[in-house]
Image: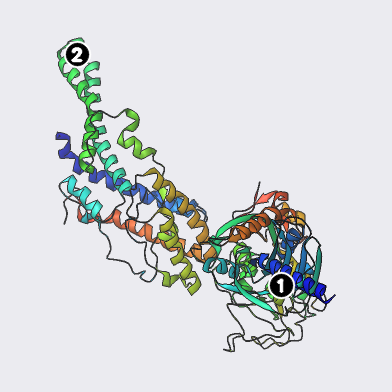
Amino acid sequence: MKINSAILAAALGLASTSLASAQQYVYLTGSTAARAAVYNTFMAGAGFDGNKTAFIGYGSTTPANCSYMEFSNTIGGVITIVRCHWSGSELGIADVSNGTSESFANDALTAFPAPGVGSALASSANPATTTTSTVDFAQADNDLPYSYTVNSTATSVNDNLVIPFVFVKSSTSLTDQNLLTDINYDNFKAIAQGGSKLALFSGVNTDTTWVYLAGRDHFSGTRANCFGVTGWGIKKSPEQIMLDTTGNMTDPNGDGSYLTTEGQSSGGTLAKSLLNTGLNTDQISGNTGFIAVAYLGLADDATAEGAPYNAVRLTYCGVPYSLAAVQNGQYAFWGYEFTMKKSGIGTVANGVATALAANLGSNTSGQEIGASTMNVKRAGPTGYVTHK
Amino acid sequence: MQVMSRALRISILLNVALLAGLGWSASHELKSVSVHEPKAILAAEAPAITGALPPISNPAQSEPFRWNQLYATDYHVYVKNLRAIGCPEPTLRAIVSKDVHSVVQQKVDELEKKISSAAAGSWSLQFGSRTNVEAWKAELQSLPDEETVMLADYLGDSVATSPPDSASKPSGAAVAREPISIPLIAEPVDLAALNLDQSQLQAISDLRQSFMQKIGGPNQDANDPAYQARWRAAQTETDDLMQGLLGNEAYENYQSQALAKALAKTADGLQTPISSNPSGNGESN
């Protein structure tokens, strides 16, 4: 038996070595807004030999909301793991343009079931181990001309996927806060330049509570779309506030202004900062209580509107978000999703990227809209919505 | 070439009239064109970039331009002066074509009037002037060729060995050419007065660089249809991007300042030759 065991152990070792040497990796980063559609698309088998994909995710107990994702399947019979870390649209564009690296979850091959077995494991914890790698391709909510990365060498592919966005406000019981129901081109500019009295929204001249914009940093595609659609200007610096995990104002620049041209690095962080701000100190005006208005994708909006945050969704230009309102052109706060391939992308990664881009539109999660269902179109985040 | 002796004086008068028309047109469009149509407001005839676009670090303006700097008693020198100040080649060609055609048209009118008068006279007068009428008609028929030769001479082109057909008459071609607009981003403005932040200034710099790359760089043949097509596509895209990247407010302020400068320049061009050259004889000071 000892001999047999030794032979079996050796054989197992050889198999593992063979398996290890055969596996290949693809690295994906970028927009958080499309991650649920990406999850659906890879789990459906796009780019792989079949639809039995094994998944491990971190950052959320909901697989489609994880900030770190790993998809294991085979391509041409070779075990292939697609590793994703959702860092934001602009950072993704910068990565594929400049050859910079990102951190990815680094589970061993043995953490996944054998090829041909579909599964999904998700944890709210951070990955136990990570690895750093350059990025093969990235998801972005804005096309290259609107990017902070100038003269990118990346190749942009339209994903035929529409990403809707919404405005929400922090929950408070402040007087007349209920009269703040809508964001439009003009009042957005008022809050983006450092805040505005609630009176601008309520029409009640005595409303001295302040309304501030709580937003994302310039790596965010959501921010690019928001600033483009509202006419604020994608490259125009805002004066936003940043809230901590208790909904209190922070002083990002350390200069006592409590305002910043940057913002939260992820939509999830922003959503989770939108706690009740009704009793928190307005460090800018000195008042007790203020209202924070934020721009989010639908997945993060779901977080913000849920307990314990209980943020309240607002209309945009008088129109509430709905699938039909986007599809028919009444609701204009949305943008297209793009896949950005790095110059010189490898054959395997290119195949995965191409398959993903081709199938995202038909694997939506309810937080995105397939472009083929749209009755309207636009040239970009600054383009007017026109009927097809 | 007797026509030539009057050409210059007529040319100056026509140019003054042309500039007056441009001034009226610009002011008229100022009132009626929406803020989303900068191309219409700032439209110019086929510009050719011969060097780098205005650097954002040096928005200061050069010495005021005076039209009398261009005038010369010799039309060849006038054309040379236009080229020397960087007048875009298509614009220069449009001016020269219009000048030459106007002079030739005047000759056409004179000849036709003579022929018409002769035909309206008595039978004996008609018979007596028969030889003249035939000469006038022959001269009339030769004028298109003469116009072509004049145009080539002034522009420094090689003279066509065979007469062009009517469809390719220089003036007709110039009129038919689709106007090409300068992207707003290429208009020199006082950026300091626009109160832009660093990110917006960088966007302007990036857009200027991007535009140059899209048209294929400086010093190209402005008459190349492929170049013109690249220019048109890049101009439209650049204007759209500029509004989206800078924001509506900054875009409109930029547009207003560029338009004000364009109108001031036009007004300068209208007033100076009249005050400094009241006789309109084309003499330079």
User: Given the image, on which type of amino acid does mark 2 rest?
Assistant: Gln
How many numbered markers are drawn?
2
Which residue shows up at 33% across the image and 48% down it?
A: B221
Q: Is residue A327 above or below residue A281?
A: above
Tell me which corner region of the image, top left, top right, bottom left or bottom right, holds residue B124. Answer: top left
Residue A375 shows in the view: yes
The residue at the point 73 percent across, 50 percent down is A373
Estimate the x, y position of residue B264 in percent, counting from the top left: 35, 59
Determine the secondary structure under disc 1.
Answer: loop
Query: What chain letter is assigned to the residue under label 1?
Result: A
Q: How is the image coloured?
A: rainbow
Whether tag 2 and tag 1 are in contact, CB under 8 A, the answer is no
| B140 and A58: which is toward the camera | A58
Residue under label 1, please give it: A67
Q: Secondary structure at mark 2?
A: helix
Q: Say above or below: A13 vs A285.
A: above
Residue at 21% across / 50% down in the picture?
A: B80
Q: Amino acid at mark 1?
A: Ser
Report x, y in % for residue A118: 81, 62
Q: Is residue A317 left or right of residue A224?
A: right
Question: Mark 2 or mark 1, which is nearer to you?
Answer: 1
Q: Nearer the viewer, residue B146 or A298?
A: A298
In this picture, residue B166 sits left or right of residue B234? left
Whether residue A303 is visible: no
Q: Position of residue A6 (x, y in %)?
A: 78, 75
Instruction: Name the image quarter holding residue A17.
Output: bottom right
Alpha carbon distance from label 2 to label 1? 98 Å
Q: Which mark is residue B126?
A: 2
